[in-house]
Each structure stands twice: as structure tokens, then as C-alpha cells.
Amino acid sequence: QVQLVESGGGLVQPGGSLRLSCAASGRFSSIGTMGWYRQAPGKEGEWWVASIGPGDTTDYADSVKGRFTISRANAENTVYLQMSNLKPEDTAVYYCFAVATVRIEGRYWGRGTQVTVSS
């Protein structure tokens, strides 16, 4: 119904930058809020990172404010996460989500992309 595919993860040194992308495809009539969660190694559950609404209203977790920037390209159904000044504690699997309407509104998830911040 709705597929989300993340890309852009990898290994980066502390203080470095990475840009994650997530493209949505499938048979949906509309996409609303999109965003990112992350799951750190050895920790249970996913933690919300950032969201962007269909009108480009953004919101960030306190831990990433001033370092991460979320944006979207509506024509391509794609959301981005520009991550700067990365810290070792940012190491995690990053999951993209999108609220999309197929027959009813639902939340859909990508499979995740690994981000490792290490020297």
C-alpha cells in the first residue's frame, strides 16, 4: 500500500554531517506529516527525532534542536533529515514514518537506516 525507503546512513566522525532521505511510494491519495524516529543500540523502543507537517511546520526533539533540519519535497513524496555536528549519542537506526491516506489514514514506516558516529 505505502512503501517508505530510507537512504543516506553510514559511518561519520563526531562533528560530521549526514543527510538522510526517505521516499514514499504506493497507492495513497495523500501524505500528511512525515518524520523520523531512531532506536539506539541496546535500548528498547524508538525515540522521536523530528516531524514536518504538510504545510512545512517542523518540530524537533530537544536533543537535536539546532543540529538537525527536517525538510520535505512534496512533489517527490520525500522527507529529508540533514544532520550536523553529529555526536556519538546520535548513533542509532533511523526510521522514517509517514501519515498517509489509502482508504483511511494510517501511519507507515520504513525499514530503517544505520547511522554510526564514531572516531
Image (cartoon, rainbow, N blue to C red):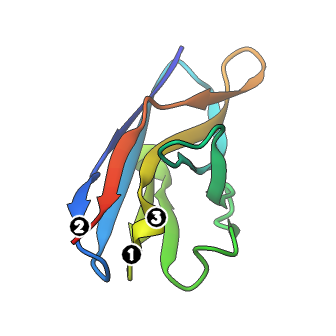
- Where residue 90 appears, as percent x and y from the top left, is 46, 64
* CA neighbours of label 1 inside 10 A, class few (<14), some (14 to 19), many (20+): many
In the picture, measured across the screen, residue 6 lies left or right of residue 39, that is left
Q: Find out whether the residues at labels 3 and 1 contact each other: C-beta distance under 8 Å.
A: yes
Give the residue drawn at x 64%, y 38%.
44
Confirm or deny contact between disc 2 and disc 1 (CB under 8 A): yes
Q: Which residue matches tag 3?
A: 90
Mark with earlier residue (2, 3): 2
| Residue at image location 41% in from the left, 44% down from the top | 22
| Amino acid beneath label 3 | Asp
Q: Nearer the viewer, residue 66 or 57?
A: 66
Give the SS element for disc 3.
helix
- Dividing the picture into quadrants, the one containing residue 5 is top left
Sequence-earlier tag: 2 or 1: 2
For the image, the number of numbered tags is 3
Horizontally, residue 23 falls left or right of residue 38, namely left
Tell me where residue 19 appears, x and y as whole percent. Answer: 32, 63
The residue labelled by disc 1 is 86
Counting other residues with Cα less than 10 Å from the Cα at mark 2, is it few (<14), some (14-19), or many (20 or more)? Answer: some
Q: Is residue 83 above or below residue 9?
A: below
**Residue at 21% across / 72% down in the picture?**
119
* Residue 40 appearing in the image: yes
**Residue nearest the viewer, comparing 19 with 44:** 44
Q: Residue 93 sits in which quadrant?
A: top left
Q: Is residue 109 above or below residue 83?
A: above
Please state which amino acid type lies under the numbered disc 1. Answer: Leu
- Spatial separation of the CA atoms under disc 2 and disc 1: 8 Å
Depth check, front residue: 83 or 39: 39
The alpha-carbon separation of the residues under discs 2 and 3 comes to 11 Å
Give the residue number, with chain letter if any, for mark 2. 12
* Three-letter code for the amino acid on which mark 2 is drawn: Val
User: Distance from label 3 to label 1 (Cα)?
Assistant: 6 Å
